[in-house]
Image (spheres, rainbow, N blue to C red):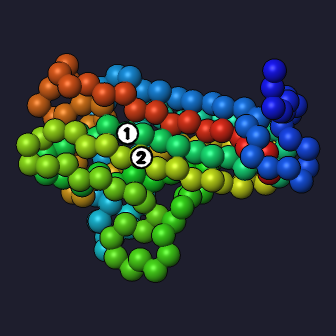
């Protein structure tokens, strides 16, 4: 018995909200990387940002009016530091705040306490790519100082204790 049957290709045009496909990338390994200073050269230094290893999803929308619901959850380690995070579709930054003149334009960020443990960072965004060509959603990160070491799924003092798993999930939603 069912209340509703949704076609494999989603709901008919004019209907909305049916999930057509889901793709996910999960990073279960502890990672560390050296990145640039996001605040270098007067702030909002996007060239300092690097891809977060293992956290990108390529998806081909089945319809040009589909929307993509992107969700991510990260475990970020540090010791009284700030890690900046940016969501992109291909090379385009998404969910860019307006009216920010200094600081974190176009990024999310998380801070860690002085005990050197991990913090979590989660976000959701509904994107309208307006294409049926493959698109890639990915996460980038940067630090708040030159030669800053970034930590994913671990805290700085150990890569074998207190390990987390991070993920990015993309769902195609019928428009």
Check contact, mark 2 vs mark 1: CB within 8 A: yes
Compared with 82, 102 (above or below) is below
Position of 79 compared to 137: left or right? left
| Camera-nearest residue between 162 and 93 | 162
Evaluate whether residue 95 shows in this view: yes
Q: Residues within 10 Å of mark 2 (few under 14, many from 20)?
A: some
Report the residue at 56% width, 36% height from top.
Answer: 169
**Label 2 to label 1: alpha-carbon separation:** 6 Å
Name which residue lies at 81% across and 32% down. 3
The percent coordinates of residue 82 (x first, y second) are 24, 55
Residue at 50% over, 75% down: 98
Tell me which corner region of the image, top left, top right, bottom left or bottom right, holds residue 150.
top left
Q: Residue 80 in the image: x percent, y percent?
A: 13, 51
**The quarter of the displayed image where residue 78 is located:** top left
Q: Position of residue 73 (x, y in %)?
A: 42, 40
Q: Quadrant of the N terminus?
A: top right
Residue at x-position 47% and y-position 27%: 26
> Is disc 2 placed on a helix, strand or loop?
strand
- Can see residue 33? no
Q: Which residue is identified by label 2?
A: 122
Q: Which residue lies under the disc numbered 1? A: 74
Q: What label does residue 159 carry, if any?
A: none
Label 1, secondary structure: give it.
strand
Front-most of residues 47 and 98 = 98
């Amino acid at each position: 018995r069912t209340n509703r049957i949704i076609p494999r290709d989603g709901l008919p045009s004019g209907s909305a909200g049916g999930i057509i496909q889901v793709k996910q990338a999960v990073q279960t390994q502890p990672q560390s990387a050296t990145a640039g200073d996001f605040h270098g050269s007067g702030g909002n230094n996007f060239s300092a940002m690097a891809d977060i290893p293992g956290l990108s999803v390529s998806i081909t929308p089945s319809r040009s009016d589909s929307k993509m619901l992107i969700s991510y959850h990260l475990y970020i380690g540090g010791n009284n530091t700030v890690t900046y995070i940016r969501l992109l579709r291909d090379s385009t930054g998404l969910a860019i705040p307006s009216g920010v003149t200094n600081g974190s334009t176009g990024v999310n960020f998380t801070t860690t306490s002085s005990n050197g443990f991990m913090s979590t960072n989660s976000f959701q965004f509904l994107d309208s790519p307006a294409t049926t060509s493959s698109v890639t959603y990915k996460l980038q990160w940067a630090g708040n100082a030159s030669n800053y070491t970034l930590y994913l799924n671990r805290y700085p003092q150990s890569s074998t204790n207190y390990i987390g798993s991070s993920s990015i999930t993309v769902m195609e939603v019928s428009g």
